[in-house]
Amino acid sequence: MSEPILPAERHKLTPLNNVIFMSRWLQLPLYLGLILAQCVYVFHFWVELKDLIGAALGNAASLQHILDAVTVPGMKAATKLTETIIMLVVLGLIDVVMISNLLIMVIVGGYETFVSRMHLDGHPDQPEWLSHVNASVLKTKLAMAIIGISSIHLLKTFINAAAYEPQVLIAQTVIHIVFLLSALAIAYTDRIMIGTQNMSKTPH
């Protein structure tokens, strides 16, 4: 009778396999870089918010910064803080938040999926989606986040529709529809794959 294989022997990697497996840590600088990009977005958010509050309080410099940020060619020049200007600035802030959320999903989900486990089980602040994250789930969530960001940009364009050529409006709408169709295709493909896997596991 042959001796049983010990777990340590069963899972021992060859030097080449170990090098290939350890190469996943090359992604670590990429995720650290995204964290720095997140810091830039946080700084940008507070600068925009500071200018909005300053403009509301009557600061001329803050108002000028706001107008320079939201005014597009062809848009009627504004000389004061209007409801439309406030709406455009707030949509810009929401856009920054949604992109920041996208970065968090890529950083946390990508690191957990492709680099190393973070051992967050039982942590009170563990994201709900992280408990069942995999490459397929992460891909779908990223697609939905991109659709949300695209929706914000499209809404900002529609608010200033008079300042844009019809071709620009049509192009942005078509791009947004393409994002929607892409997300639906990704979700449908994942559903087919999950269904196929479940059928293969079902005893005949």
Image (cartoon, rainbow, N blue to C red):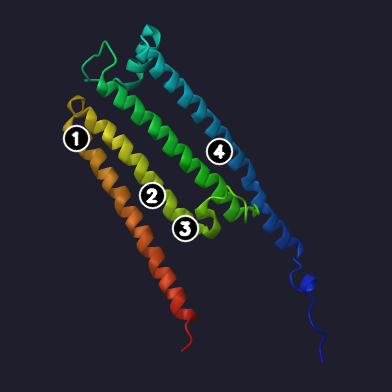
Report the mark closest to the observer, 2 or 1: 2
Q: Is residue 100 left or right of residue 56?
A: right
Q: What residue is disc 4 on? A: 34
> Helix, strand, or loop for circle 4?
helix
Q: Quadrant of residue 68?
A: top left
Q: Is residue 153 above or below residue 44?
A: below
- Could you tell me how far apart the alpha carbons at marks 2 and 1 are, in whole angstroms? 26 Å
Mark identifier at residue 167: 1
Q: Position of residue 199 (x, y in %)?
A: 44, 79
Residue identified by numbered label 2: 144
Picture disc at residue 137: 3
Contact check, label 1 and label 3, Cβ < 8 Å: no
Instruction: Answer yes or no: is residue 51 visible.
Output: yes
Q: Amino acid at mark 3?
A: Val
Of 203 and 178, nearer the camera is 203
User: How far apart, in angstroms, are the residues tagged by discs 4 and 3?
Assistant: 20 Å
- Which mark sits nearer the N-terminus, 1 or 4? 4
Q: Secondary structure at mark 1?
A: helix
* Residue 14 percent across, percent down from the top left: 75, 65
Tag 1: Cα neighbours inside 10 Å, few (<14), some, or many (≥20)? few
Q: Is residue 72 visible?
A: no
Marked residue nearer the N-terminal end (1 or 3)? 3
Dot 3 and dot 2 residues touching (CB under 8 Å): no
